[in-house]
Amino acid sequence: MINKSSSLQMTSNVLRQKHLKELHDAYIHFINERCYPLILEIFNTYRKMIKQQADINFDLERIQFSYEHQCRNNISIDHFRQIINDKLQKLGNLGSPLLSDRLSVVNPQQLITTDADENPNKIVINKIHVIMQKTIEQAQHNSNMLDDIIKQFQRPIVNNTLN
């Protein structure tokens, strides 16, 4: 009976080892054929997602920097524009006490004919004032043209930062 029991134990151990080896082989097959490709796919998807998130963060920072830079430029351009307009208005509002209302919108040629009998110093001052007024008007016109040009440049910059 001892031999029979011992023989049964040996057979049982052999069968257990055989089943364990089969189970181990099935486990290795399952890991290699089913799990590993899924793990690789998940890992690659995760890497792509991390890279995409980093790209989005980089683009966001670039857009934010560009936006802040544009705001600073717009503020400085607007400030510069305001200073120019204020100076031009001050110069435009300066009036010569020697000028009469009828001379405020005349050209220099009319000054010569209408004021020929007046004091020569007054004539020169009036001519200078008329020339100064025309210069101021031209500067205001050029300032408006500069504003239009700046606005044309700002549109593509804003569109590029939004794209």
Image: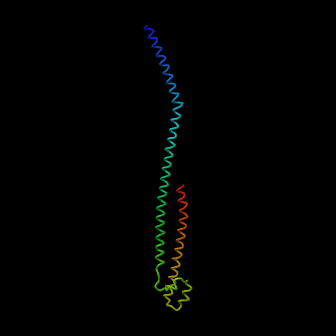
**Residue occupying the point 49% across, 55% down:** 63
Q: Which residue is at the far left? A: 2
Q: Is residue 56 above or below residue 148?
A: above
Q: Position of residue 123 (x, y in %)?
A: 51, 87
Q: Position of residue 22 (x, y in %)?
A: 51, 22
For image coordinates 51% across by 79% down, the residue present is: 133
In the picture, residue 1 is in which quadrant?
A: top left
Is 13 placed above or below 72 here? above
Q: Position of residue 114 (x, y in %)?
A: 54, 89
- Residue 148 screen position, x and y as percent: 54, 67
Towards the viewer: 83 or 22: 22
Q: Residue at x 52, y 29 (%)?
A: 30
**Rendered image quadrant of residue 141:** bottom right
Which colouring convention does the figure follow? rainbow
Choose between 159 and 130: the one closer to the eye: 159
Residue 33 against residue 156 in the figure, above or below = above
